[in-house]
Amino acid sequence: MALPPRSALRSDRRRQYLRLRHTVWWVRLAVPAALRGLYSSPHREANLHTRDLDEAARAKLIHLHRWQTEFAAQLAA
């Protein structure tokens, strides 16, 4: 299966927060500047274990919600 041109991939809103590594989609979210000292990396990443963009776009929501909730709780503390 051939991948679409990179320009088409960049403009697709489903790809927000997603990275394609080899043939597998990953979700990536930047850690807020105020919390970077608590993390070993300036971003959080998770392997979505799928090659399908539609499936990845749905799966990323679980990670994003969990991480954003975690960040909000840490900022409120």
Image (cartoon, rainbow, N blue to C red):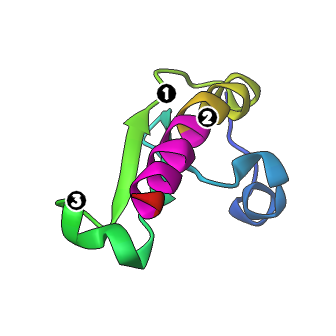
The x, y position of residue 19, in whole percent, is: 53, 50
Asked whether the residues under the numbered discs 2 and 3 touch, taking CB atoms below 8 Å apart as contact, a structural biologist would say: no
Identified by mark 1, the residue type is: Leu
Horizontal side of 35 relative to 29 (left or right) equals left
Residue that numbered label 3 is attached to = 39
On residue 48, the disc is 1
Identified by mark 3, the residue type is: Tyr
Residue that numbered label 2 is attached to = 60
Q: Which of these two is toward me, 52 or 76?
A: 76
The kind of secondary structure element at disc 3 is: loop
Identified by mark 2, the residue type is: Lys
Horizontal side of 66 relative to 60 (left or right) equals left
Q: Which of these two is toward me, 42 or 67?
A: 67
Residue under the point 40% across and 37% down: 46
Mark 1 → mark 2, Cα distance in angstroms: 7 Å
Q: Is residue 30 above or below residue 61?
A: below
Q: Quadrant of residue 10?
A: bottom right
The kind of secondary structure element at disc 2 is: helix
Q: Is residue 62 above or below residue 76?
A: above
Mark 1 → mark 3, Cα distance in angstroms: 21 Å
Residue under the point 39% across and 58% down: 77
The x, y position of residue 21, in whole percent, is: 43, 44
Residue under the point 17% across and 60% down: 40
Mark before the other along the chain sequence, 1 or 3: 3
Point out the stretch of residues depicted in magenta.
64-75
Mark before the other along the chain sequence, 2 or 3: 3
